Image (cartoon, coloured by chain):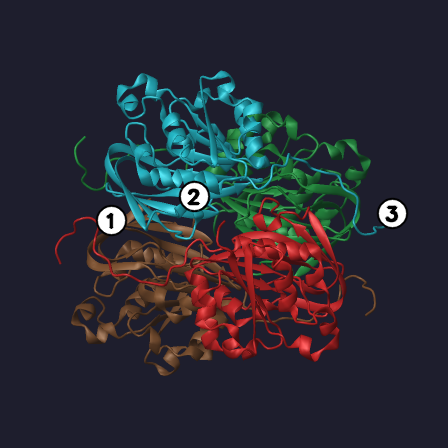
Chain colours: A red, B brown, C green, D cyan
Amino acid sequence: MSAPLRITVWNEFRHERENPRVAAHYPHGIHETIAGFLRVDPGLAVRTATLDDPEHGLAPAVLDATDVLVWWGHQAHAEVGDAVVARVQARVLEGMGLVVLHSGHYAKIFKALMGTTCSLRWREAKDKERVWNVCPSHPIAQGLGDHFEIPVEEMYGEPFDIPAPDELVFISWFSGGEVFRSGATWRRGHGRIFYFRPGHETHPTYHQAEVQRVIANGVQWARPTIRRPDACPNVAPLEPLPPG
Amino acid sequence: MSAPLRITVWNEFRHERENPRVAAHYPHGIHETIAGFLRVDPGLAVRTATLDDPEHGLAPAVLDATDVLVWWGHQAHAEVGDAVVARVQARVLEGMGLVVLHSGHYAKIFKALMGTTCSLRWREAKDKERVWNVCPSHPIAQGLGDHFEIPVEEMYGEPFDIPAPDELVFISWFSGGEVFRSGATWRRGHGRIFYFRPGHETHPTYHQAEVQRVIANGVQWARPTIRRPDACPNVAPLEPLPPG
Amino acid sequence: MSAPLRITVWNEFRHERENPRVAAHYPHGIHETIAGFLRVDPGLAVRTATLDDPEHGLAPAVLDATDVLVWWGHQAHAEVGDAVVARVQARVLEGMGLVVLHSGHYAKIFKALMGTTCSLRWREAKDKERVWNVCPSHPIAQGLGDHFEIPVEEMYGEPFDIPAPDELVFISWFSGGEVFRSGATWRRGHGRIFYFRPGHETHPTYHQAEVQRVIANGVQWARPTIRRPDACPNVAPLEPLPPG
Amino acid sequence: MSAPLRITVWNEFRHERENPRVAAHYPHGIHETIAGFLRVDPGLAVRTATLDDPEHGLAPAVLDATDVLVWWGHQAHAEVGDAVVARVQARVLEGMGLVVLHSGHYAKIFKALMGTTCSLRWREAKDKERVWNVCPSHPIAQGLGDHFEIPVEEMYGEPFDIPAPDELVFISWFSGGEVFRSGATWRRGHGRIFYFRPGHETHPTYHQAEVQRVIANGVQWARPTIRRPDACPNVAPLEPLPPG
């Protein structure tokens, strides 16, 4: 039996402590809900970390023991320390996987890896979201059918300012009239990044089976192949060159 | 007659003042050599800026009047102020074009836009570089034939830690045995970015006709289509939604 | 003044002669409507060709004099001769631009260039289509705003079996609940291909200003940079090799 | 224990029977050499098929029982029947993996899936090939280091007329002065395609450990996620529409 895939679920964990409507859906925090459904898979070893932990729960030793990091943040992006962001970015480029959820589109770590504003249009209303599977053979899309619906969600709409994804997996339809590239992947350095749109804190989105399946597929997909620190080596020639 | 394309050529301009071997090739600085051959085109309005100018020569008013920025830096990347880097990045995402040359692979602005380490392998020796045109119909590749040679150049080799380019235009062959993706493009935000490898300061590379042609093609290709500031609008629905 | 861009608009031209509802919108054929709005631009020289012309109107001399070919077909894809398809494919690979419209997703020429089934889901009903601009800086997206609506159109939905586009320009929202990658580009050989979804024959879609703008932008974007026949040259080495 | 991955290695198998120099390297055919080193993995069930078998060894029942097809052809591409090519293409689009080797760049099946000429420049001489790993985290690149050398190989050089790969894994350096995108992947339909350049019949390339490793990695990478026949469904709306 192979070693378990080590997952760290990071959450800002502020809304749940401040807003009873959020706490009603996620009494122990969004991170514990996500960790809980991931733990059903015995091949995963799941821990959690939050903003208000020392070093935001992302000390070097934690990242050393993390294969894939899941990220949820929203109102407190600015409180995430730049040193921690740089540390996480370095680990992704070394090979650690990263799954960024919903409002994490504006997290420092996502913006640093994308290089763009990551802006979008948005609305908190009673939109229905229907997530279309545009790449049915993608590992992240397995077990889902051609589409699934989320009864009520915050709307995110195009244009979404991201680099063109390496792979576009999902496009969302919203009943208010917009579309959004809601599942997308990028390879950066030796690491794999998956962004998945759904998951506003005032809705029970992370309790929905299809959403759980996507995130479970996503952490498997983001599994590292290698971990290799940055280097910019000065090298000798492999073929004879003129002297000088 | 249409308005000229406004180019700003930015150069660190330190090697030329410190190293007589560099000054021999570029007595007025690499920026003046590049500006000089670009100015042959009456459709271009070319200015220059350097690290030791106030605000590195990149005050907001300069960027407001720049359609495409050309960047050469090497030994003093760390001296470029973070505020100026953020300002340039914002302008690129708004639509300004950016042409990054040679050791600019490690410039703060290039790393910020790529999100990766931008590391590579390298060697200063007597390598010959042969630049192969792998996308003959690309606008940047026009007028060049299937390949051209640079008699002596610094070697840059793979793996080069960049996001997969939107378009790969050139691959270089080095006589010491390496290869390199030496011409590549990315769209980021509303701006277009072109990286072109050749141009070590101790060689007369920017005096070579083919290299000049590539850079001239590159600034044309990077021409903005739009300039649009960042926004993340909260929008009303376009279709009727349930109240709430 | 530069030479005009030479456009050939190809149409199957059967629906218009068989179905009065179609003829009501396009009394002289879809090709003449498209040619008509393109001719407003004095920089374009536009001709038309149809299935029932000798050689489908696509004799070698016509293709020699065509910079960009626009293609509309639907019920008679199977009647397009394989030799003509091979001829058109060769020209695209040599550098001729190709703009494929609507039901042309199933045209032999589009399938040959894509290599995939080009299947999709579809419905003829009273869907509203809203076309979202997901790449605002793309030349094809200029002059349009973030979205535009087509009051009634046939629905095409995902998954659409195409190779991942080089550039995704538009995504459509349909009131019946689907989404579709409705504007996409590919480079194949030395030619540029643009697929644009709208344009069912029973609707007046090609009379709508935004649709006309997209097609006009598309033919400009697909303009050839080079025309180069296929070759697979046996070449001498550029560097000394051991004998043998 | 999971079911074995079912591999079919297809070979033209003409050179080996006609040319003693080829037979010296591959006395039972290139297919048997490839099948032999793949069979070392107990997780693979490997069979072979050749051009002169009935239906080229690719009857529907064989393809039904094939997860990944490996293809080597050269002098007799034209003898592969169009019906078999169409059958194989349909299976790839349904999800079967395809690994195309060396001169298979000109195989009907590869050209049909790419949509381009697949032309390149070439030379049979005493070139050394050095294969550079440009995507170190890619599953196909595992176990190889940053580069490996093939002492003598046929040269293939750029420009190589293929659609821009989804992932570029290897670039080759040749001692005669050329470069080549020698390892590339594409997703087409639900299937995965890997092209790998080395393997001229007059050299013992397929006996080299690194080459064997790449091919073994490639068949694992090309493993199907789904098998789904083509469909273009006419569907009912998911949301209420006006009648008509």
Give how far apart the Cα atoms at labels 3 and 2 are. Answer: 49 Å
Viewer-proximal residue among B186 and D196: D196
Could you tell me the amino acid type at mark 3? Pro
In this figure, which residue is indicated by the disc labeled 1?
A: B177
Rendered residue at 60%/74% (across/down):
A12
- Residues at marks 2 and 1 touching, judged by CB atoms closer than 8 Å: no
In this figure, which residue is indicated by the disc labeled 3?
A: D243
Give how far apart the Cα atoms at labels 2 and 1 are. Answer: 21 Å
For this orientation, the residue located farthest to the right is: D243
Instruction: Say whether residue C129 is left or right of residue A159.
Output: right
Give how far apart the Cα atoms at labels 1 and 3 are. Answer: 69 Å
Could you tell me the amino acid type at mark 2? Ala
Residue B72 is situated, as x and y percent measured from the top left of the image, at 33, 68
Q: Chain of mark 2?
A: D
Residue B65 is situated, as x and y percent measured from the top left of the image, at 46, 73
D239, above or below D87, in the image = below
Q: The residue tagged with tag 1: helix, strand or loop?
A: loop
- In which quarter of the view is residue B218 placed? bottom left
Q: The residue tagged with tag 3: helix, strand or loop?
A: loop
Could you tell me the amino acid type at mark 1? Gly
- In which quarter of the view is residue C19 placed? top right
Viewer-proximal residue among B51 and C84: B51
Viewer-proximal residue among D237 and B11: D237
Residue C198 is situated, as x and y percent measured from the top left of the image, at 69, 47
In this figure, which residue is indicated by the disc labeled 2?
A: D184
Residue A23 is situated, as x and y percent measured from the top left of the image, at 72, 73
Q: Closer to the observer: label 3 or label 2?
A: 2
The quadrant of the image that shows the C terminus of chain D is top right
Rendered residue at 13%/58% (across/down):
A244
Q: Chain of mark 1?
A: B
